[in-house]
Image (spheres, rainbow, N blue to C red):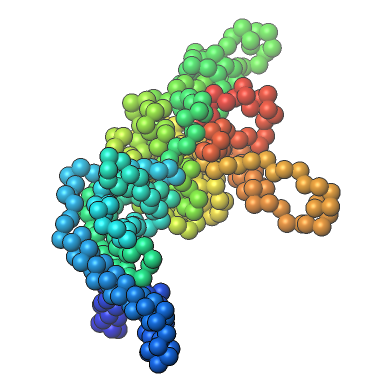
Amino acid sequence: MKRFRRSMRVLQHVLRRTIDLFPWTPLGLVVGACAAAALYFIARPHQDLVLLVLSYGMLAFLALAGLIVPLVALWMGLRRPPMRAGEGLQLETLRWCRSGFRPNSLRWLPFIRLRWLWQRPAGVEVRFQRREGSLEEEVWARRRGEYRQIERRLVIEDTFGLARIRLPRQETLPLRILPSVGRLNDVPLRRSLAGGEAFSHPLGVAAGDRIDLRRYAPGDPARFIHWKVFGRSRKLMVRSPERALDEARRTVAYLMSGSGDEASAAAARLAIEKGLWGDDWVFCADGSEHEVREVEAALSLIARSRREGSARVEGFRAFLAKMDRGGPAAVVLFAPPQAGAWLESVVALARRRSLPFRVVVGVDRLLDAPKRPWWQRTLLDAAPDQGNLKEELRAIQGQLAAVRCELVVLDRDRGQPYDFVRSPAQRAVAAASLLP
């Protein structure tokens, strides 16, 4: 069975190469057949000189195109541009970026045009810009990723589309496609919070000075008893450490991959490049078993973390268990906007932790649904897609709030946070404390 599949792949490859190298297009074959039929069945038997000239001219032009296009393709195949194996290329999604690829524009050859497209990585659009007398490639990538080489397909054809040859072109070049941050740079940012003594907070750890009071319990040292309170109320009260928070001295972050996670990955990239976690931070992402502490290595993990389908929490659970052995730290989870089985696992993990963590979700163009006319509300029951996404995010927020975890929703396209609970005035006051 494996040998049969291998043979089928080889046969498919040979057929594809044969079709790519066959000079005439379906349009050219149809035009040639029509010209030949008109010549032998109408023009020559009836001595129609006009149709005779047109038929011979069309067949001559078709033969000339079938000769010139292969010769140009052979010249393009022999004349390869210089390789850039040691440079490396970094692009961003959702924006036109220069790749540095400059093929010959063929301006000196009339009626012949050159275009090309990317085979691998997939999901990349190509356009051409003429600069300094030559063509320069600009690409638009839809998804992030990291690759070792670029596979292009060059298409040489005549302007009428009668003859065409496709040539594969591989370039060994380390390629990294990172998610675009869009307008997330406009969002006010702050550092993460963890246990400390900076300011009192009920969710903080008991690590401050002994300025709080609680009822005496068996086993409490007698030196912590507040005797003045006992003298007034005849109740034993002991001094206890204050619950407080401080800027995180150690931050651990994790990127969970799934469908629609490009905006969340962009938020993770922004936090890493801006240095929002200070000097002591650890980052990991789906698809990697090792955590990193350097910016370049973290960006590489973000690029390689793309995965279609529903998000899973196995990697985050193992990463969190490993990080908890190193002591207390602020935990940041970048998650996709779709709720699923991962949410229940994250809620279960949060219940077992003394300190809550923050979940950051990125979205694209999350707008308030416009108010529809009464006749649409009466006749059309289907809600817009944005409303469904908002309801899903509200459900995520409700489950996270039950375990004291904060949900941060960032709109990459508009460059602002989205809050489902706070009023607009409260949202403006809290805007400076959104992205950890």
Picture residue at 52% right of the left edge, 21% below the top: 244
Q: Is residue 408 above or below residue 240?
A: below
User: Residue 76: where, in percent of width, then height?
Assistant: 20, 60
Q: Is residue 3 visible?
A: yes
The answer to which of 230 and 52 lies nearer the viewer is 52
Q: Residue at x 22, y 63 (%)?
A: 72
In the depicted structure, whether residue 224 falls above or below residue 337: above
| Residue in view at x 73 percent, y 56 percent | 382
Where's residue 310, x and y in %? 50, 56
Query: Is 97 above or below relative to 276?
Result: below
Closer to us: 321 or 378: 378
Q: Is residue 326 above or below residue 135?
A: above
Number of numbered discs: 0
Along the line of sight, the residue nearer the viewer: 141 or 162: 162
Residue furthest to the bottom: 45
* Quarter placement of the N terminus: bottom left
Q: Is residue 391 left or right of residue 218?
A: right
User: Which image quadrant for residue 94?
Assistant: top left
**Relative to 316, is 157 on the left or the right?**
left
Q: Nearer the viewer, residue 48 or 420?
A: 48
Q: Is residue 300 left or right of residue 408?
A: left
Residue 325 position in % (x across, y down): 36, 38
Tell me residue 238's x, y (percent): 56, 17
Residue 327 seen from this side = no
